[in-house]
């Protein structure tokens, strides 16, 4: 059974906040994240569920070098939910 958290989508304000938090100090991370953010966090049509946004928030807490290793596929996350999101981000690049 899928919980209501997984089915609810974030609102435009939460999407804008996430986009702001996704701005990184490492240009490579920005370039990889941008296509995903443009596609799924468009303020006019947010397409991320609350659960996906929660995963994205956790991903953005990682230090830039570790995030880059995940986004480039050099490392795999031990967190299955996080790895699904990483794969989704990589698929948009």
Image: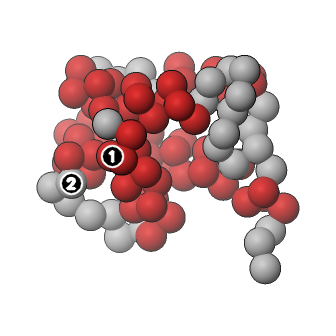
Residue situated in front as seen by the camera: 43 or 25: 43
Write the residue at 68% across / 21% down: 43
Image position of 66 (left or right of 12): left
| Proximity of marks 2 and 1: CB atoms separated by less than 8 Å | yes
Query: Is 4 situated left or right of 20 in this image?
Result: right
**43 is higher (above) or lower (below) than 49:** above
Residue furthest bottom as drawn: 1
How far from the left and from the top, in percent, is residue 80?
A: 44, 70
**Residue 29 shown left or right of residue 39 in the figure:** left
Can residue 14 be seen by looking at this rendering?
A: no
The residue beneath circle 2 is 73
Percent of width and height locating residue 37: 50, 30
Q: Is residue 65 above or below residue 35?
A: below
Helix, strand or loop status at disc 2: loop
Secondary element at image label 1: helix
Q: Which mark is residue 31?
A: none
Q: Quadrant of residue 10?
A: top right
Quarter containing the N terminus: bottom right
What is the crowding at mark 2: few (fewer than 14 residues within 10 Å), some, or many (at least 20)?
few
Q: Which residue is mark 1?
A: 90
Measured in 3D between alpha carbons, the distance from the residue under mark 2 to the one under mark 1, in whole angstroms, is 8 Å
Residue farthest toward the right in the current orientation of the protein? 4
Which sits in the foreground, 54 or 7? 7
Q: Nearer the viewer, mark 2 or mark 1?
A: 1
Q: Residue 68, how many percent across, how many down?
A: 23, 41
Task: Depth check: give the residue in front, 89 or 66.
Answer: 89
């Amino acid at each position: 059974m899928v919980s209501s958290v997984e089915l609810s989508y974030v609102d435009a304000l939460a999407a804008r906040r996430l986009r702001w938090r996704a701005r990184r100090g490492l240009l490579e991370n920005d370039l990889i994240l941008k296509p995903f953010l443009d596609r799924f966090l468009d303020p006019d049509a947010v397409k991320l569920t609350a659960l996906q946004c929660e995963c994205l928030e956790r991903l953005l807490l990682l230090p830039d070098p570790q995030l880059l290793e995940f986004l480039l596929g050099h490392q795999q996350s031990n967190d299955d939910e996080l790895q699904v999101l990483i794969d989704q981000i990589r698929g948009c690049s």
